[in-house]
Image (cartoon, rainbow, N blue to C red):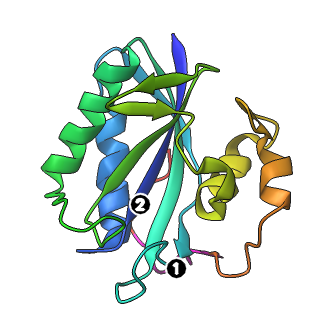
Amino acid sequence: MARAWIGLGSNLDQPVQQIQGALQALAQLPASHLCRASRLWHSKPMGPQDQPDYVNAVAELETQLEPLQLLDALQSIEQAHHRVRVQHWGPRTLDLDLLLYDQQRINHPRLKVPHPGISQRAFVLLPLAELNDQLLVPDHGPVAQLLGALSTDEIKQVLPFEAEGLSTL
């Protein structure tokens, strides 16, 4: 079984519920086991600022799916959540990114692992550190070290009342 780390993000159509639904879908992936997920975090959009803030999380998954099979499964979950790709870094109902797949380096036209930009994205590193701050990001170093170099001032935990009804894994 490979260990994969999935970044989740949403800023449209009830983002907390979108993330919850995505986690439930990840838990049902064939030949896979959803180990755990981080708390939910609010963050400012990385791209155009004329869009709502995001809700982000990271999930840890054990899987027998090969990387491209897992990517296809993630994109299928996005489609089930009515993901529309209109604008780069634009608003979305759901974004699922394969951040890491074991310690592999993958450079395929459809998939780059570690995920490009992971070392500069506090909204990814903060929930990832919550799960494993000593996890090594190939070619970059430990998550805790990467996160320590970034500001997390604008990333706030989703409050319990905002996540009401959100089941914990």
Viewer-closest of 24 and 108: 108
Location of residue 88 in the rendering, given as x and y in whole percent from the top left corner: 31, 64
* For residue 108, side relative to residue 14 (left or right): right
* For residue 47, side relative to residue 138 (left or right): left
- SS at mark 2 in the image: strand
In the depicted structure, whether residue 37 falls above or below residue 94: above
- Residue located beneath label 1 in the image: 44
Location of residue 110 in the rendering, given as x and y in whole percent from the top left corner: 32, 32
Specify whether residue 122 is painted magenta: no
Which stretch is magenta?
156-164
Q: What type is the residue that disc 1 sits on?
A: Lys
Q: How many marks?
A: 2
Viewer-closest of 48 and 82: 48
* For residue 117, side relative to residue 64 (left or right): right
Determine the residue positioned at 53% across, 75% down.
42
Location of residue 69 in the rendering, given as x and y in whole percent from the top left corner: 29, 20
In the depicted structure, whether residue 30 falls above or below residue 91: above
The dot on residue 9 is 2
Q: What type is the residue that disc 2 sits on?
A: Gly
